[in-house]
Amino acid sequence: MIIVFGSIGLDIVQSVRRLPRPGETVLTADYAMLPGGKGANQALAAARAGADVRFAASIGDDDFGRRAIINLETTGVNLDGIVHAARPTACATISVDSAGENQIVVSSGANLDTTAAQLNAGMGDLVLQQLEIPPTEIWAGIDRAASQGARTILNAAPFQSIPPASLAKLDVLIVNEVEAAMLAEDLGLDPAHPHQACIQVRDRFAMTVVLTLGGQGAVAFAPNVVLQASALPIQPMDTVGAGDAFVGAFVAAMGADRGIEDCLRWGSVAGGLTCLQPGAQDGVPDAAAIKERQGEIVIAPVS
Ligand code: RIB
């Protein structure tokens, strides 16, 4: 079982010709209200990739909350761990420009009411977290998952300082280049060399580090090998949620006991296909779609 412990919300997505500069107003005709939140997106991606998924999170007792869980419900994610909080459901405003570049502001709302007490795992489970709920609950969640015998995976997005004691309890850390540089700086490593920093984090905390590189693919810094995976050759129309789809499918492959190469393949295909449709969840592929395209991902060792 994969247990995702984290954020959920509703995304208000606006397509703009170009992103506004500070102090500038730009006009656009329409907007869409779509399910989102990194935790929910990752839970959905893992479930669509074929994993048994339980999601623990908080929503308000409101229309946004009901809309936010729709895709999780129809995909069969176990939502027993969702509680109704006093605060309203989280909401993100997302602007996407004509090149697919985006700008996101998240109002955390009910995500701030999420507590580690909602998280229950067992031996053999994988617990996946992100950094969109209160930090104390994230670190407590890592402690709880590790003490309950689960494998722990953290997607350090959006980045904030992670206590070394929590890093030491992780099996896998997934970061993009910006997050890798921020982590390096935070740990006193060289932010100008994210690959080197990932190797140092891997060695210092005895874990696997995965660095996602957008259109350049991803690199896994596993204990005995460093592997680079290419990205799926696609023309992106909206990259929102691509990182979440990578993480969810990568962890689904881990849960199915696939090797690190397949985990990278599954993550890369899911991340790529998600960019072909608007919003964070509509384009997230199922296992059949992933298997059909996984042969296009080239994996090569990095020396
Ligand atoms: O990673 C994309 C997600 O980040 C969006 O769905 C938005 O809700 C923000 O949390």
Image (tube, grey):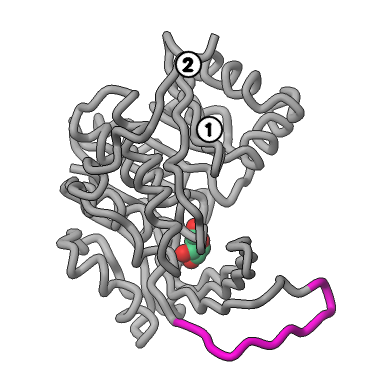
Q: Which residue is mark 2?
A: 226
Left or right placement of residue 169 versus residue 198 in this view:
left
96 or 44: nearer the eye? 96
Q: Residue at x 43, y 75 (%)?
A: 10
Mark 1 Cα-neighbour bin, 10 Å: few <14, some 14–19, many ≥20: many
Q: Where does residue 186 sit, x and y in percent of width and height?
A: 70, 33
Label total for image: 2
Q: Which residue is mark 1?
A: 211
- Left-right relation of 139 to 145: right
**Residue 30 in magenta stretch:** yes
Q: Residue 31 placed where, x, y %? A: 52, 85
What residue is shown at x 35% (from left), y 87% (from top)?
63
**Span colored in magenta:** 21-32
- Name the dominant secondary structure of the magenta segment: loop
In the displayed structure, does residue 19 sit left or right of residue 180?
right
Residues at marks 2 and 1, CA–CA distance in whole angstroms: 11 Å
Q: Counting other residues with Cα less than 10 Å from the Cα at mark 2, is it few (<14), some (14-19), or many (20 or more)?
A: some
Residue 289 x, y percent position in the rendering = 23, 50
